[in-house]
Amino acid sequence: PLTLKSGTSWSDTWQRCLAVAPEAFRDDRVLNLWGAAWQTDGRALPATSPVDGSPIAGPPRLDAATAHQAVRASLDQHRAWRHVPLDERRARVAATLDTLTQHRELLALLLVWEIGKPWRLAQADVDRAIDGVRWYVDGIAPMVAGRAPLDGPVSNIASWNYPMSVLVHAMLVQALAGNAVIAKTPTDGGVACLTLASALAAREGIPVTLVSGSGGELSEALVRAPEIGCVSFVGGRDTGAAVATAVADLGKRHVLEQEGLNTWGIWNHTDWDTLSAVIPKLFDYGKQRCTAYPRFVVQRAVFDEFLAAYLPAVRTLRVGHPLAVEHPEDRYPALDFGPVINAAKAKELTDQVAEAVDRGAIPLHHGNPADAHFLPGQDTAAYVQPVTLLNPPPSSPLHHAEPFGPVDTIVLVDTEAELLAAMNASNGALVATLSTDDQATFDRLAPQIRAFKVGHGKPRSRGDRDELFGGFGASWRGAFVGGELLVRAVTQGPAGERLPGNFPEYHLMP
């Protein structure tokens, strides 16, 4: 039987948080950070870990009136911070990165318990945040030359899946560029990790505000308040559409990253060894990523060869408890993914798969729960084994929407026109890939795929450092980011400047 790795229990992790940042943690809850002070306000909600269903710290949810107070206090911080010399801002952000590095293991362990990341991926999330911001610290001077901070703080509303490499990374770059920053903790997880990171940043004088609450309760303050200089959002299309309407009405600077059905096309392809090697990597974190590939669009004539490459690869996936080991002092287990974000999401995915099969989808693969890596008797309600379906029916959500879980769907096509139509099923995506032997075929078809990044036989990612990022169609609204564009998105340039991005009045590629 497996056991929990020594020193990694939630109790052990929580005690370490109390020791490292006692100002931000109490015995039974985390605090909100606003007005340059840790506040005991907000109603702390119960929460459970997706890893094993055990209780963990929940978000201390503020009401709308207190959120408005927090935004006004952030504006006061912003007006002071925007005049801090760049060298001092660089020094304070660099000091923050040093202390984040010092506590990277604790930050990663919080990600394991709060959002179910396997250890390798949790560490990568922390490291990408630190390394990415260091790149900006080293190169910020020419990026802000001739530019000024915004008139108000940047409000960040992000999904739960990448608290460090997306949210904390963005916050520190925004602050480096001269803005105070506000972040709302994701409702579904990551509050303790973000609290610890914010505490370490606040100690170095970074003007951070961190609040919890429901989107409906806080949106008036965090999106519509006149004090807000820019809204940065990462999440689903439904919520994103509401935010987009609000910022468009107000003429407010915005960066809205939304979901899209990222697709991988197979056309006149024979390099099956390369494809087989990448299949397990595409399941990292159970495909709970904005750049995951949940849909394969496969030429019918090569479908048998595709299956011969795909099925053995997907059968190698290792799923289970991210901290379960044979002996307490063993290394962390090497898993492809652990739980999905919560039991409700697991049930939703399971129901969607069953419904799709009832309506005619053909099941090609379903992972065996008996092969999973669990502790004896642990709660496994948030775990979903990898599933692959052929031809989900048009009536199924799996036909047209991103499942955000370890579910692959395959559709077969016979012509290039059908290939492009199937790859563009969601009116825009963040990434796509086309596997084809012929470079000329790729060069001809890739521009017709409605994704910001299109790979030739290789997956594309959000990117780091100088790599740009955005989306086509409904997958993105507002300014594009990445590299210098992230700094341009949160600073003011010359009068009449048109930022690269997808805006209601124009679409401008970098």
Image (tube, rainbow, N blue to C red):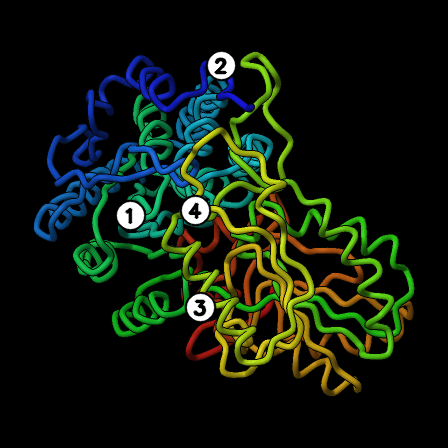
- 370 relative to 131, above or below: below
- Nearer the viewer's eye, disc 4 or disc 3? 4
Q: CA distance from mark 1 to mark 4?
A: 37 Å
Q: Single out the residue that lies furthest toward the left.
A: 65
Q: Which residue is mark 4?
A: 382
Quadrant showing the C terminus? bottom right
- What residue is drawn where x is 55% and y is 66%? 471
Mark 1, other Cα within 10 Å: few <14 / some 14–19 / many ≥20: many
Q: CA distance from mark 1 to mark 2?
A: 42 Å
Quarter assignment of residue 440: bottom right
Q: CA distance from mark 3 to mark 2?
A: 45 Å
Q: Which residue is mark 2?
A: 6
Given the image, on which type of amino acid does mark 1 rest? Pro
Of callouts 1 and 2, the N-terminal one: 2
Q: CA distance from mark 4 to mark 3?
A: 32 Å
Q: Callout 1: helix, strand or loop?
A: loop
- The image shows residue 247 at horizontal and vertical percentages of 30, 67
Who is closer to the viewer here, 454 or 485? 454
- 144 relative to 18, above or below: below
Cβ atoms at labels 2 and 4 below 8 Å apart:
no
- The image shows residue 36 at horizontal and vertical percentages of 20, 30
Given the image, on which type of amino acid does mark 2 rest? Ser
Mark 3, other Cα within 10 Å: few <14 / some 14–19 / many ≥20: many
Q: Which residue is mark 3?
A: 477
